[in-house]
Amino acid sequence: MWFRVVSYLKFLVKSTNEHGVHSPFVYNYVTKCLYSKKRLDRNRSINILLKTIAYFKFESISIPDKPEIQDLVRQHFGETQFDKKIIHLLFVDGLDTASFKKMFSEETLRNNSIILIDSIYKCKESLNLWHRLIAQPEITVSIDMYHCGLISIRREQVKEHFTIRI
């Protein structure tokens, strides 16, 4: 309980809005997607997931072990395909570095793939996993939104980390 309270206060101190973003890719994502008034779900992480799918127009998505979220995505985006060989968007509760490296080496995740990780502040271990993951050299963009985190593989971009209030 105290971990979440303290971590949220630290997040608020470090976080910024679109004015602290120097990357055009992240600035557009924040202003045109995250800050859009459209609310697709009451759960913030799922709302971010649905907005992200709509913004990037992803076709191939993986949401392992969450059939209810897959059904919700199908309701909003009927043409979406799940669990293909190449994944444009991966939505998970947690991801360790070994699993990430395996998916990256098998080319399941490629340039411009995005991973949304739900509840990165659930506990200390979740936050530690997040920090180990964003330290990987293949990951060039990471966005901490407290409720979830986004990591992206963009070879054309310099490695940057953002902490964004939504």
Image (cartoon, rainbow, N blue to C red):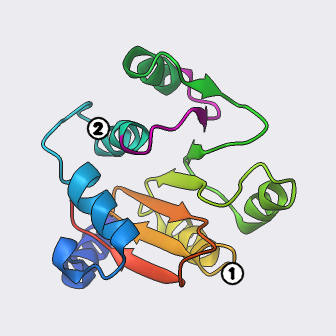
Which label sits on residue 61?
none
The x, y position of residue 22, in whole percent, is 31, 82
Which label sits on residue 43?
2
Near mark 2 (Cα within 10 A), the count class, few <14, some 14-19 or many ≥20, is: few
Front: mark 2 or 1: 1
Of 8 and 47, nearer the camera is 47
Instruction: Identify the residue shown where x is 47% and y is 82%.
Output: 160
On screen, residue 149 versus residue 106, left or right, reads: left
Q: Residue furthest right?
A: 106
On screen, residue 136 versus residue 17, left or right, reads: right
Of 90 and 155, nearer the camera is 155
User: Who comes first in sequence, dot 2 or dot 1?
Assistant: 2
Kindly identify which residue carries mark 1. Answer: 137
Question: What's the residue type where badge 1 is placed?
Answer: Pro
Q: Is label 2 in a helix, a strand or a loop?
A: loop
The x, y position of residue 25, in whole percent, is 39, 67
Q: Which residues are magenta?
A: 55-67
Residue 110 found in image quarter: bottom right
In magenta stretch: residue 59: yes
Decide: is 60 above or below 2. above
The reply to whether residue 71 is visible in this rendering is: yes
The reply to whether residue 3 is visible in this rendering is: no
The x, y position of residue 27, in whole percent, is 29, 68
Instruction: Identify the residue shown where x is 25% and y is 30%.
Output: 40
Near mark 1 (Cα within 10 A), the count class, few <14, some 14-19 or many ≥20, is: few
Residue 97 found in image quarter: bottom right
Instruction: Identify the residue shown where x is 87% and y is 53%.
Output: 106
Q: Is label 1 in a helix, a strand or a loop?
A: loop
Residue 114 found in image quarter: bottom right
| C-alpha span from label 2 to label 1 | 31 Å
